[in-house]
Image (spheres, rainbow, N blue to C red):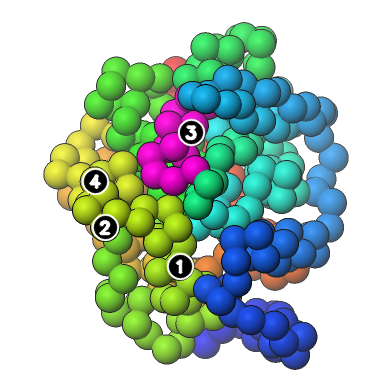
Amino acid sequence: MALDQATTGLLSQMASQGGPALHEMSPSEARAFSDEISALNPAGPEVKSITTESIEVENGQIDLIIIQPKTEALGVIIYYHGGGWVIGNAAGHQTLGQHIATLSSCIVVLVDYRKAPEFQFPIPVNDSYTALEWVDENMNKIAGKRLPIIVSGDSAGGNLSAVMALKARDNNGPKISCQALIYPVTDDDLNTQTYVDPANQLLLSKDAMVWFWNHYVPNKADRKKPDASPLKTEDLTNLPDTIIITAGHDPLRQEGEAYAARLVQAGVTTTFKRFEDQMHAFFTMAGILPRSIEAIQFVSEGIKTHLINTKF
């Protein structure tokens, strides 16, 4: 299926402005470009409150943006932003967080993990797990009572979310009730069919992913580790209920759908949907691309239904 009209219009507008491709930029230039795209999003829906907590991580601090919904919270979603572990930040995902908090009736905690190349693998993983443990230990402070924990994220954040579920399972860590993975990075194979398809070289391309991986995990042997490529995990049993969405025109589509298939084979309750006429990054463009809101609703309502139907 071809890209929808809104997406082709956005890409045409961006192309008319010229400028280098993402993989031709420095990390600082790419971060500025990412911030410009995030700034296009209008303000999110009104919420009860938005606060920031600074937490200690190994050799540093990171911020958590905590978004409280106007309704009584059913759970706490720990959300890891995308951006290839190099670009993006929690603040740039605040509009998205407000939408998710409102539609899911959950507290949303946006994690501002440290990024490559200044902080390479496994530092973002370790920061993310520290944030998970902090939320679990400070649940009463955040929510006033014990609530189920959901991990979620888009792209590289989907990768980190999947890794959090695996690490929590394997280390007797915080109990995760559900994971919601948005076109996640799950593997280091840069030569899948969807990676090399010319129709998928759009806002995210194979060249861009090579650039991201080289900054995040320059040692190619480390890319084979499950903490970098969760699809390489031998055992995917006993993981939380999972929601996965992919985009039809996305280099990452094949690995995201392979992860969904592996979870189903492992007996994990898995809800999957492909948005055929969308490109990578569409989920974070609420107010820019119409189907973004549809996807946010699908994920948020899936989380809400899970929480309502699951005994905690």
- What span is in magenta? 119-132
Q: What amino acid is found at the position of numbered circle 1 in the picture?
A: Trp
Residue that appears at 65% across and 60% down: 28
| Label at residue 130 | none
Q: Is 131 within the magenta?
A: yes
Q: Is residue 33 left or right of residue 309?
A: right
* Number of other residues with Cα within 10 Å of mark 2, as a class: few under 14, some 14 to 19, many 20 or more: few
The label on residue 211 is 1
Extreme residue toward the left, this view? 234
Q: Position of residue 15 (x, y in %)?
A: 69, 87
Q: CA distance from mark 1 to mark 4?
A: 19 Å
Circle 2 — which element?
A: helix
| Mark 4 / mark 3, whichever is N-terminal | 3
Q: Which mark is residue 220?
A: 2
* Residue at mark 3 to residue at mark 1: CA–CA distance: 22 Å
**Quadrant where the C terminus lies?**
top left
Q: Which residue is mark 3?
A: 128
- Checking the image for residue 225, the label placed there is 4
Looking at the rendered structure, the secondary structure element under dot 1 is helix
The numbered mark, 4 or 2, whose residue comes first in the sequence reads 2
Label 4 neighbourhood size at 10 Å, few (<14), some (14-19), many (20+)?
A: some
218 in relation to 280, above or below: above
Asked whether the viewer can see residue 231, the reply is no
Q: Earlier along the polypeptide chain: callout 3 or callout 1?
A: 3
Where's residue 58, x and y in %?
Answer: 49, 24
